[in-house]
């Protein structure tokens, strides 16, 4: 079965515990089998010679086997639970490590809900079969073998009739497993869909509340919840049929055998003691045997879990590192795109089309263009989050595929618009990319990112733990913490992907000026729709529909017809519109700042040139 194939490597790691479990089960089965046999011998001896001493001796023997069964049972449960927990730990660890190694292409096609269900629920569903099911299965088998041998010594005919139960039970279990596997898989898949909607809804609860979409979200959840209910009910029907059906089958078989045994006793084929032993052995087997229906269900669930976990562990990574990949030494950081085309796995159309671009080390570049023009996608190719569908990305004159992935990413830092923060302290979030940083370095990075003063106002300062995804902070505060994180990591190529969109203009101006001043010779790429970013760059690249449509300095592009000039004209129109507003003081500041930026750009003033001088 799939489950046993999947679990075999983990059993090898725990082989001594596995051997101990099997040994203890055999000892327990041996003790349980000998209790009825001891009763048989005591009864037979007492009938032949009714002496009280024989009763006492029989009691001591039975007490010995009972104690042996009790002690072995306690030891078995302790070792078995430790063994099952260790295996679950190893599986969880392997799943997490695999998920960490997968590239972003996997996450672009798989939902977080399904990933969470596989990582937690599927591993947890193995607990029953590892901690309880295997023990019941082996104990039942061992008791059956012991009973068969004991019966064979008394009556081969009765033993053979007893053995006929096995093929019947195995046939029912096999047919059930074969016919219902897909129903169990669909049940677990639909559970993953429920997890998916829950995770998505709770992560976007602010958006749901903002748009008053609670009712629609309730209906959306009701649909996936109903789909899960339907899938789960199919499994319930299997449980309702298989579990009592298996118990009925075993009970009926034993009733028939007891009737035959009674006939054999009355006709003198077997003696009374053997019949008593047979009855007790039958009842002993029935106790664990009545759980075989539950065990069959657990095996089905374990097979489904193994299948879904294997889907993760067998997932191929599309960012493949060459066996002879070299460490990137960072000496030549010239960045080139050669005839690059790219499309996402689930898309038919190309997001990037024939990109040819060269950015020298130390350049300060603004990347602008309409939403969906491919700006962020282009940037994501630099640290090999994705590989081009066609063409090459080069660093230092060599294809980045010739370098080890981690060595490239050490030199490239991206601050995304959706700045992700972990449920850690502010200090740990800033030091996420440089765990060896001193407190002074963390504070310096926070000062550069214009977030130090805010942190000092918090009751616990840098030790303040932010909520999940930084929910306790404003958008601008999250963005500035993310910027501090990148500045502390100190890569040679820094990308700001619309990473100051939530910061007020005044703070943005200070932030960009300080960063531009202190970056030195590093390469800076800014993706932004705000004109203030243009003051700190010496080159503007304009993208539209996956292509580079303009590339040059501000003074050239502003005189040419095209998107860049339209972009500045739109900003100017926005400023004119703001004049007629009944503005607040904050809005007036924004208008004045935008107007000053536009004046500087029109006058040819560029702070990047001043900084370089």
Image: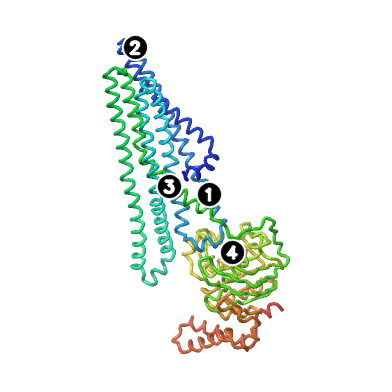
The answer to which of marks 1 and 4 sits earlier in the sequence is 1
Secondary structure beneath disc 1? helix
Neighbor class of circle 3 (other Cα within 10 Å; few <14, some 14-19, many 20+) is some
Secondary structure beneath disc 4? loop
Query: In this image, 392 relative to 458: left or right?
Result: right
Q: Nearer the viewer, residue 106 or 572?
A: 106
Pair 1/4: label in front: 4
Using the image, tell me which numbered label, if any, was put on residue 93. 1
Query: In this image, 277 relative to 109: left or right?
Result: left
Q: Are marks 1 and 4 in contact (CB under 8 Å)?
A: no
Secondary structure beneath disc 2? helix
Instruction: For marks 2 and 3, give the CA distance.
Output: 53 Å
Name the residue rendered at 34%, 16% in the picture.
42
Across and down, in percent, residue 539 comes to: 65, 79
Name the residue rendered at 48%, 30% in the picture.
23
Across and down, in percent, residue 264 comes to: 29, 21
Instruction: For marks 2 and 1, give the CA distance.
Output: 60 Å
Pair 3/1: label in front: 3
Q: Nearer the viewer, residue 345 or 332?
A: 345
Q: Mark 3 = which residue?
A: 125
Q: Mark 2 = which residue?
A: 53
Q: Mark 4 = which residue?
A: 385
Q: Are marks 4 and 3 in contact (CB under 8 Å)?
A: no
> Residue 189 occupies which quadrant of the picture?
bottom left
The answer to which of marks 2 and 1 sits earlier in the sequence is 2
């Amino acid at each position: 079965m799939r489950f046993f194939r999947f679990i075999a490597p983990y059993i090898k790691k725990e082989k001594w515990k596995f051997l101990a479990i099997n040994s203890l089960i055999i000892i327990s089965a041996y003790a349980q089998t000998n209790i009825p046999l001891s009763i048989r011998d005591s009864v037979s001896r007492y009938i032949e010679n009714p002496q009280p001493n024989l009763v006492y001796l029989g009691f001591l023997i039975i007490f010995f086997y009972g104690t042996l069964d009790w002690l072995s049972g306690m030891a078995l449960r302790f070792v078995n639970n430790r063994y099952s927990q260790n295996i679950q730990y190893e599986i969880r660890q392997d799943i997490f490590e695999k998920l960490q190694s997968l590239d972003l292409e996997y996450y672009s096609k798989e939902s977080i809900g399904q990933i969470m269900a596989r990582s937690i629920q599927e591993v947890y569903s193995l607990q029953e079969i590892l901690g309880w099911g295997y023990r019941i299965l082996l104990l039942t088998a061992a008791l059956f073998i012991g009973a068969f041998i004991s019966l064979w010594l008394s009556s081969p005919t009765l033993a053979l009739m007893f053995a006929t139960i096995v093929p019947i039970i195995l046939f029912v279990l096999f047919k059930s497993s074969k016919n219902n596997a897909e129903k169990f898989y669909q049940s677990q898949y639909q559970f993953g869909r429920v997890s998916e909607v829950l995770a998505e809804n709770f992560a976007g609860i602010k958006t749901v509340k903002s748009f008053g979409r609670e009712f629609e979200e309730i209906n959306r959840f009701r649909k996936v919840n109903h789909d899960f209910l339907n899938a789960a009910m199919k499994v319930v029907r299997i449980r309702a049929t298989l579990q009592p059906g298996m118990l009925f089958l075993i009970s009926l078989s034993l009733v028939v055998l007891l009737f035959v045994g009674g006939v054999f006793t009355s006709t003198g084929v077997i003696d009374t003691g053997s019949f008593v032993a047979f009855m007790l052995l039958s009842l002993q087997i029935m106790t664990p045997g009545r759980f075989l229906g539950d065990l069959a269900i657990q095996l089905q669930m374990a097979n489904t879990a193994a299948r879904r976990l294997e889907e993760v562990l067998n997932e191929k990574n599309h960012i493949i590192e060459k066996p002879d990949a070299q460490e990137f030494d960072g000496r030549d950081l010239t960045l080139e795109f050669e005839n690059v085309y790219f499309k996402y796995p689930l898309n038919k159309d190309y997001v990037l089309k024939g990109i040819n671009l060269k950015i020298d080390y130390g350049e300060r570049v603004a990347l602008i263009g309409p939403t969906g023009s491919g700006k962020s996608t282009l940037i994501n190719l630099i640290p090999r989050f994705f590989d081009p569908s066609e063409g090459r990305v080069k660093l230092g004159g060599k294809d980045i595929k010739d370098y080890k992935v981690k060595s490239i990413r050490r030199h490239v830092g991206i601050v995304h618009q959706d700045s992700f923060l972990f449920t850690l302290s502010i200090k740990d979030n800033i030091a996420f990319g440089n765990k060896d940083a001193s407190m002074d370095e963390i504070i310096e990075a926070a000062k550069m990112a214009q977030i130090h003063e805010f942190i000092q106002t918090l009751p616990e300062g840098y030790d303040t733990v932010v909520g999940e995804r930084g929910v306790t902070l404003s958008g601008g505060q999250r963005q500035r913490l993310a910027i501090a994180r990148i500045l502390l990591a100190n890569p040679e190529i820094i990308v700001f992907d619309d990473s100051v969109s939530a910061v007020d203009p005044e703070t943005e101006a200070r932030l960009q000026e300080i960063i531009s001043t202190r970056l030195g010779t590093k390469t800076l790429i800014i993706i932004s729709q705000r004109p203030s970013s243009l003051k700190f760059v010496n080159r503007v690249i304009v993208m539209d529909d996956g292509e580079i449509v303009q590339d040059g300095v501000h003074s050239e592009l502003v005189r040419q017809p095209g998107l860049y000039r339209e972009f500045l004209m739109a900003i100017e129109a926005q400023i004119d519109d703001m004049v007629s507003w009944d503005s607040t003081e904050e809005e007036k500041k924004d208008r004045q700042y935008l107007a000053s930026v536009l004046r500087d750009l029109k006058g040819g003033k560029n702070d990047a040139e001043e900084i370089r001088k």
